[in-house]
Amino acid sequence: MRSLIFALMLALLCFSCSGSDGGDDETSSADGDSDSDGDSDSDGDSDSDGDSDTDGDSDSDGDSDTDGDSDTDGDSDTDGDSDTDGDSDTDGDSDTDGDSDSDGDTDSDSDGDSDSDAGNVSAGCGGSSPLATGNFTENIDGTSRKWMLDVPTNYDANNPYRLIFVWHPLGGNGGQIVNSGYSGLKQRSNGTAIFVTADGLQGSNGEASGPGWWNANGGDMKLLQTILDKVNESLCIDQDRIFSTGFSFGGMMSYTVGFQFDVFRAVAPMSGDMQVIPYDENNTAPLNIMAFHGTADNVVSISRGKAAFDKYLTRNGCGSQSSPVSPSPCVEYQDCDATTIWCEAQGGSHAPASGSEDAIWNFFSQF
């Protein structure tokens, strides 16, 4: 009996120790659902190759990995939207080559629309040795030429100034222009402009003779170019605000330099024409003009003055219609590519038009 009981106990013990290598409840093996190859293992949803692994959504190749949406190649990486090649990177919308960069629309560099730009100014800006008001002499093809400069007393080398040329009439000289306050413009400029004038040379044609702008062998145009070079080199000049005006021969010079040179923003000739001074038609782009002439001018006829103005009407692409502008009797032509104003004084003689000083300064100062 005792041996039977012992045998039964031994059998029961062997049954309770049945194999741990099989069965459906295995949870920690290397091949089950929770092992390294199952849902939680290194190849399953939570493993190194699954949704949470290094190759899945959160791994080095997935949405959160170094190659996915948040990685170095994805939306937030160095090649994606926020990276060095994406929208916020050095090549994207916010980078040095994108919309906010050195080549984009809103950047602040030298190539973009909103970039820093000192403006179209002369080399003399910031200079420490500017030219001062006074008389100067140039050698132009062996001929001594005299010119005069007026610089504001409060000149600031870092502030770009207007440059205004004022040319004297036949028989006059630069001193005449200086003494007139540059035809009244200096006072009106209130220190915002630099003025230049010069002496014309003796000459003649079949109609008249005397000191003026005969431009023999191109000498007057060479003088103008020399003055421009010296003033721009030494003084701070706004290159987009260079102007010319003058009366009679000075008006002829202003009409003419607008075709010879491409530096002028506007011209304001008075009682001039374009039939006396030889010139090269180097510039035919639209150019702002305000011209004056009297209908009773017996020195330079109104027809000659109107012919000169008509050349500007053509180059400025104007229509045939005009409308009154201040001062009376000026009219501005419509549909032009540049401001084009004609001031014809009924009964006006060969003399500067009444009120022309204010009119010309207001015309120049709008630019």
Image (cartoon, grey):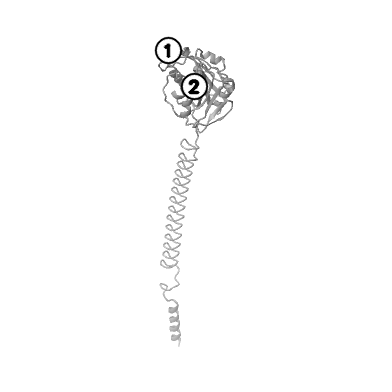
Which mark is on residue 143? 1
| Residue 280 rendering spot, x and y as whole percentages | 41, 22
Question: x, y percentage for residue 99?
Answer: 48, 42
Give coordinates of residue 212: x percent, y percent. Answer: 47, 14
SS for dot 1: strand
What's the amino acid at mark 1? Thr
Quadrant for residue 45, please give it: bottom left
Q: Residue at x 45, y 77 (%)?
A: 16
Task: Pick the residue in front: 265 or 273.
Answer: 273
For the residue pair 33 and 365, the one nearer the viewer reads as: 365
Residue 213 at x, y percent in the picture: 46, 16
Q: Look at the image and tell me in which quarter the C terminus lies.
A: top right
Q: Amino acid at mark 2?
A: Ser
Residue found at x 55% / y 24%: 343
| Mark pair 1, 2: CA separation | 35 Å
Q: Which residue is mark 2?
A: 303
In primary-sequence order, the first of circles 1 and 2 is: 1
Residue 314 in sight here: yes
- The mark total stands at 2
Residue 249: numbered disc: none
Between residues 151 and 36, which one lies in front from this camera angle? 151
